[in-house]
Image (cartoon, rainbow, N blue to C red):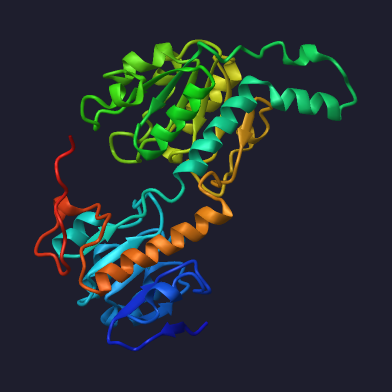
Amino acid sequence: MPPMTFGTDTGKNVLVADFLDQVEVELPVLGDHARLTLAQAWNESELAPYLADTDVMILFHDIARISEATLAAAPRLKAIVRAGVGYNNVDIEAAGKRGIVTCNVPDYGSEEVADHSIMFLLALARQLGPCDQSIRDGKWDYKVADAAPRLRGKTIGIVGCGRIGTATALRAKAFGLDVVFYDPYLPDGVDKALGIRRARTLDELLPQCQFLSLHCYLDSDSYHMIDARALAALPRGAYVINTARGPVIKQDDLVEALASGHIAGAGIDVFEREPFDNEQLRAMPNVFLTPHSAFYSREGFVELRRKTAEEACRIVLGQPPRNPVNLGYLVEPRTPVTQPRARV
């Protein structure tokens, strides 16, 4: 399929690497300042014809990885703007060493993911699955919900208290839940600002939690953080919710914990392998599954695309980006950047 191009030929080129097949959101933001090209690629090798002339790359999620080889073939590339929160599909260290800023859009789906997490919590606690199935089976007996706990006073543990974790914590407080979080990267005082409790280690957090909700980034520290040992540390009958990244949980260990009854149920939006392919987990009646859709709302998706285009536009115009994620690796940046100020 030949590429589609839009916008004004100003000598600046923005390459939308994957996913999009139209630009009704992006064009009003970028169209007067750059030429937009939609590559609609599925792997990075398909980007080769465009790299020599690309100034900014917008990247969604269809391409699994932007590697050193692709970066080396893009002499004009100033920045990659990842249209999403996570940026695991960019080699940010290699980009930084070449002066290429990598940015993300960290806030577009915060409300949606927090809402989704609370949806899972309520559905699990209020026994929505068994109640719904009982009615569909022609039965009528409130005792099908006899495992439902009262939420007020129960403890929810939040792993990762960034934007989404914070939004989830505030929602959980409204239901009277005791909120405690673990996040080794946050400065002291966040617990005081939010009116919640803080655990200094995962081992301190887990034994307290009737509900565990994951909101951390996926990296070498969080990969398989929730494994058999961690699951065993939760109280028997606890519920696990994951709207973060699939590999934060060791999926086979979760299946075993659910099958044994130690974990009473789970709400899972993200999986180790996507599309989801675990038939044992699929068949479990005490599990709610959604197709990596927690981020999505119609309004949120438009916001994502608009904010992505705005970040790309800032770079095209020679302005510092708002959300760089690889400043620690950045050497002789090809575009202006502003170092973050210390938090107070």
Q: Position of residue 67 (x, y in %)?
A: 28, 62
Write the residue at 16% across / 60% down: 337
Q: Nearer the viewer, residue 299 or 199?
A: 299
Q: Residue furthest bottom?
A: 9
| Residue 178 in view | yes
Asked where in the image residue 309 lies, by quadrant, the reply is bottom left
Asked where in the image residue 288 lies, by quadrant, the reply is top right
Q: Nearer the viewer, residue 62 or 182?
A: 182
In the displayed structure, would residue 189 be above or below residue 8?
Answer: above
Q: Residue furthest right?
A: 138
Compared across the picture, whether 282 is left or right of 30 comes to right
Q: Position of residue 262 (x, y in %)?
A: 54, 14
Compared across the picture, whether 9 is left or right of 263 comes to left
Compared across the picture, whether 88 is left or right of 108 comes to left
| Residue 61 in view | no
In the displayed structure, would residue 341 be above or below residue 30?
Answer: above
Q: Quadrant of the C terminus?
A: top left
**Number of dots carrying numbers:** 0
Write the residue at 36% across / 36% down: 216
Write the residue at 45% across / 63% down: 305
Q: Position of residue 121 (x, y in %)?
A: 57, 26
In the displayed structure, would residue 73 be above or below residue 267?
Answer: below
Q: Position of residue 191 (x, y in %)?
A: 30, 23
Q: Residue furthest left?
A: 332
